[in-house]
Image: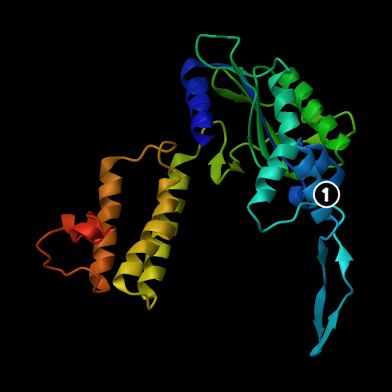
Amino acid sequence: MLLIDSIIANQVSHARHNISIAWVDYNKAFDSVPHSWLIHALFNEKVIALLSTLMQTWRTRLHVNVSGQRYQTQSVRIERGIFQGDSLSPLWFCLALNPVSKMLRNSGYGYSLGRRPTVLVSHLFYMDDLKLYTKYSDQLQSILELVSSFSKSIVMEIGVDKCAVLHAKQRKLERHDNIQLLDGAEIQELEPKKHYKYLGMQQLLNINTTQIKEAVTATFKKRLKFIMKTQLNAKNKTQAINTWASPVLAYTYGVLKWSKTSLDALDRKVRATLKENRMHHTHAASMARLYLLRRVRGRDL
């Protein structure tokens, strides 16, 4: 999704196209989706019967400690929201919000990519994070109304204070009035020189490459140092680097442009940190052995 978003932003910048963008977020989306709509989103009778029965058993208890005394409520039935902590819930939640995605695709609005004007990108949707694209501001108003209407019909609330809109004409940002929906809610225009965080990336029209690189590099180094301070053995430390530290950088590959120089500098930082913590000898004959698989006597970094 970020790759598609990056392609659109680069095309708008280089081809001087017009575009209007809106970022939409829901208030406590997982906790507020109605059970009736969750069941309505399903299509297999056996699955519906099973999950309807299971939903009747969803309960919780509240525990409070006051001056050393522990109090516990009686069992409270969960009547709204989706059960979190299992592998089915994210998929089920996506099924529940899938109709709005179909409505947006059928709206006829969106941003045209390439030479085929009939192929439009109207939105990107990841869980409850929605980004809308149109060519003109009045079209953006229309599809925001569509999203608002759908959300009301399933009794979910758009977090207007967490939403924002942006308009660009021939690569330059334009100031417009805030977008007011039919219910009176108003979506603010993104303030000048401010950014919106979408899927972990600070964005305006383009992604703020410099700021994000600095942030992910700092997080990577912090996690690397934390791993080195643990009592894990060398094999598990390497695995921790591969699964907890390196993905911070890998998430940005293909979206941000990393030069070979900057990646080589990070690689040297990793080796220096390993040497400082006696995981790699200062005078090791083979540097390449660090990156070979363990089954061929490498370190598997």
Crowdedness near tag 1: few (<14), some (14–19) or many (≥20) residues, C-alpha within 10 Å: some
On screen, residue 101 versus residue 145, left or right, reads left
The percent position of residue 253, horizontal first and vertical second, equals 40, 41
- Residue in view at x 88 percent, y 66 percent: 76
Q: Quadrant of residue 218?
A: bottom left
* Residue located at (23% from left, 59% from top): 295
Q: Quadrant of residue 228?
A: bottom left
Spot occupied by residue 16 in the image (x, y as percentages of width and height): 52, 16
Residue 128 appears in view: no
20 shown above or below 268: above
Q: In the image shown, does 56 or 62 lie closer to the viewer?
A: 56
Q: Look at the numbered disc 1 and give the secondary structure of its residue.
A: helix
Q: Please indicate, yes or no, whether residue 112 appears anywhere in the rendered image.
A: yes
The quarter of the image holding the N terminus is top right
Inspect the image, locate mark 1, and give the three-letter code of the amino acid beneath it. Answer: Ser
Task: Identify the image quadrant of residue 278.
Answer: bottom left
Q: Is residue 62 above or below residue 111?
A: below
Q: Is residue 263 left or right of residue 97?
A: left
Most distant residue in the bottom direction: 68
Farthest residue, direction front: 46
Residue 147 in percent (x, y) is at: 78, 30
Q: Judge by depth and name the residue closer to the eye, 240 or 19.
A: 240
Q: Please provide percent x and percent y for residue 31.
A: 78, 53
Q: Is residue 254 left or right of residue 93?
A: left
Q: Which residue is mark 1?
A: 52
**The C terminus: image quadrant:** bottom left
